Amino acid sequence: MAMSRFIINDIHSVIIITTFMHAIDIVRYYIYDQELHAGPLLLISS
């Protein structure tokens, strides 16, 4: 019984870690995307 509890705990922390990693990736991609769109707009407006 104690063993399965440890495994469940492990899976839970892995899910948290992967979710966190994905969140960082999404934020990074969003920032990169914003810069990508801002570049041409700045060139046009100047």
Image (spheres, rainbow, N blue to C red):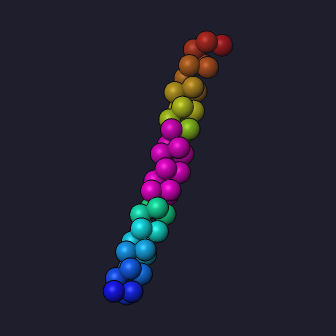
Q: Is residue 29 above or below residue 35?
A: below
Q: Residue at x 42, y 81 (%)?
A: 6
> Is residue 10 within the magenta segment?
no
Q: Front-most of 1 and 31?
A: 1
Q: Is residue 25 visible?
A: no
Quarter of the figure that contains the N terminus:
bottom left
> Can you give x and y, in whole percent of width and height, for residue 11 in the image?
39, 72
Q: Where in the figure is residue 43, as x and y percent of width and height?
A: 60, 19
User: Residue at (61%, 12%) from the top-left corner?
Assistant: 45
Instruction: Please tell me whether the stretch drawn in magenta is mainly helix, strand or loop.
Output: helix
Magenta stretch, residue numbers? 19-30
Residue at the limit of the structure toward the front, as seen here:
1
Determine if the magenta segment contains residue 27: yes
Name the outermost residue toward the top.
45
Residue 2 is situated, as x and y percent measured from the top left of the image, at 39, 86
Image quadrant in which you'd find residue 10: bottom left
For the C terminus, give its image quadrant. Answer: top right
Q: Is residue 17 above or below residue 4?
A: above
